[in-house]
Image: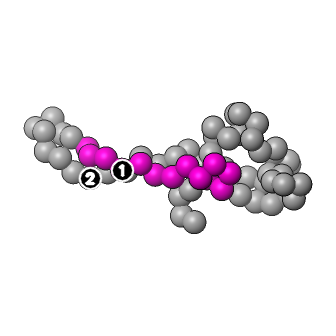
Amino acid sequence: MACRCEVCGKGPIYGCAISHSHRVTNRRWEPNLHRLKVIINGQRRRAKVCTACLRSGRVERYL
């Protein structure tokens, strides 16, 4: 799993970068992922979690 949230499944979004001269090239927007120690289903593990899941309380972080 390269760039995907392990809780909600959020991944990259694809689109086009358009320059001032209107030249179009492909690009992608990556989700804001953090590799943290979290509790998922009662188990402690290290996971890639997006910041939206952290803020909403879908996962519990432990130190």
User: Label 2 belongs to which residue?
Assistant: 26
**Within 10 angstroms of label 2, few (less than 14), some, or many (20 or more) residues?**
few
Disc 2 is placed on an element classified as strand
Q: Image point 76% across, 60% down: which residue? A: 46
**Within 10 angstroms of label 1, few (less than 14), some, or many (20 or more) residues?**
few
Quadrant of the image containing the N terminus: bottom right
Q: Main secondary structure of the magenta part?
A: loop
For residue 50, what is the image quadrant?
Answer: top right
Left or right of 32 in this view: 42: right
Would you say the residues marked 2 and 1 are in contact, meaning their CB atoms lie under 8 Å apart? yes
Q: Which mark, residue 14? A: 1
Q: Image point 51% across, 52% down: which residue? A: 11
Range drawn in magenta: 5-17
Q: Amino acid at mark 1?
A: Tyr
> Can you say whether 51 is above or below 6 in the image?
above
Q: Position of residue 47 (x, y in %)?
A: 71, 58
> Among all residues in the image, which is located at the extreme right?
42
Look at the image and say whether residue 21 sits in the magenta stretch. no
Look at the image and say whether residue 11 sits in the magenta stretch. yes
Q: Position of residue 52 (x, y in %)?
A: 63, 37
Whether residue 45 can be seen here = yes
